[in-house]
Amino acid sequence: MRGCWLFTLLLVSLGLHAIRFSDEAKRNCQQMDSVAGTVTIVFATDQAHFGIPVDSIASLWVSGPVADFCDTLPGYRLDLVSEDSCLYHTFRWEDLDKPGNSGQPEFVFFIIKKDSTGGNVYGDMMQQEKMDYGIYFPNGHRYTTLLLPCDADYLTKDVHVLASRLDTAIEIWGVDRFDLTNPVDQQHISNFRLTPGTKNLYRSFHPYYPSCPQYESEPYRLYWVGELGRQAGIRSDICLTGNMESYDGSWYRCGADSFQIVIPDYQRALMDSGNICYVGSHTGSNPDVATCYYHSDEETFAQYMGEVITFIADTLHPLPMQIHCAVGADRTGMVCALIASLCGADWEAICADYQATVNMKIRTYRHPNRLIYGIERMTGLRPDRCSGEQLRAGIRHHLVQTMGVVTDAQVDQMIVRLQQESPTGIEMVQPTHQVHKKYDLLGREVNAHYRGWCIDSDTRCPIISYVEAPR
């Protein structure tokens, strides 16, 4: 009885609206209005798959990459209540039409729950939520979903089919599943590899800061980033996360054990020689994921790229170089894609490199649509639909002529330096991607004449794409 009374107060305080949602909208957590160009995010309190008593909810928010709040939780509060007791919020489609890790717009529900005294469980949960692009409730449940594009002709409207397929593809491996005597697995666990089109720019996970301590492989990952950096003879570093030197010697928890953060000797030497570029440090604004993808056409991201290119072009900073952010997936992925293109890499190689981060096996799947979105926003060109020469010219024109953050001479000098031979003790394994059989969203194999949304059978790195019928 008390629970009903509390929820009634919630409805009254938020305002009851004379609107009802279909069962499909409740199941998919969204309702499209293609005429108005809007999307309504719906949380149906009567849906069993949430498993959360309504009287335990203090407030409900929707967040995720859909509206640039990748690093800001919670996002928008679902402050309206329908006639059938659904919490909802309506957005313009253009505000949400941004791909997340899956290659489609995504959103997650963030629930502030009441504690046993009626207060809010808030502070600790916030940090937990930011550790992965999913929602983790105190009872261990996670709920995340995808947005259906207004004009998509899906074979199934059940987004849970697509979400579950992605979820099974994003594997988490224990360290015992890697053969760390094998150079391939050493590079996979550490996300350490050469940037396409270059001979001496290595990209990686952070060289000493534990960005993903929730996974048992983290201490091994940090060890191998440091070891491969040492073997490669790294002499300069480009850091996209800000200065983490103050964490040296501190401890972090990983599972039941504690581990000490230790800066590798080669990184200490770079600090002493001044050969680390902390991108954005002079402005007090470090690169963030949203800026790199969703605001890549703006001055802030151009300034970041200008710093990176200027640093590489300067012969005072010796080769080879290492570039990284926290995980080495998004900020590093976007910057390295642009550098790779300028250095002559084709889109196939850039795309394979971008997706290779999934080999860490810590839920770091990235669909190339996210990279495509950022590059197209910056240059006006779809990298998967233009020639390599057109893309290189577009990137150069944006940085040199439009934004004026570097000169043609600096770009040329960067390219010359990155293509110099740089002897290393590491035999690098170049990422590849093989396309196998394709299936529709109902799991049925399709042939070459199929038109519609499909998923590749390569579960290590699934590609969800729309296939046009052959002409």
Image (cartoon, helix red, strand yellow):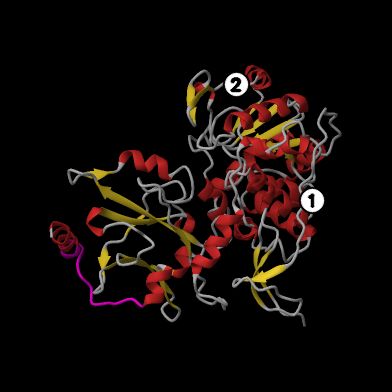
Q: Residue at x 76, y 63 (%)?
A: 436
Q: Residue at x 68, y 64 (%)?
A: 382
Q: Any magenta on residue 271?
A: no
Cα separation between marks 1 and 2? 32 Å
* Residue on which disc 1 sits: 345
Question: Which quadrant would residue 9 be assigned to in this image?
Answer: bottom left
Quadrant where the C terminus lies? Answer: bottom right
The image quadrant that residue 176 belongs to is: top right
Seen at 66% across and 39% down, the residue is: 177
Report crowding for label 1: few under 14, some 14 to 19, many 20 or more residues within 10 A (C-alpha): many
Q: Amino acid at mark 2?
A: Ile
Q: Quadrant of the N terminus?
A: bottom left
Q: Which mark is residue 428?
A: none
Foreground: 311 or 230?
230
Label 2 CA crowd tier, 10 Å (few <14, some 14–19, many 20+): some
Principal SS element in the magenta part?
Answer: loop
- In the drawing, what numbered circle is on residue 263? 2
Q: Amino acid at mark 1?
A: Ala
x and y, in percent, of residue 220 in the image: 63, 30
> What span is in magenta?
11-22
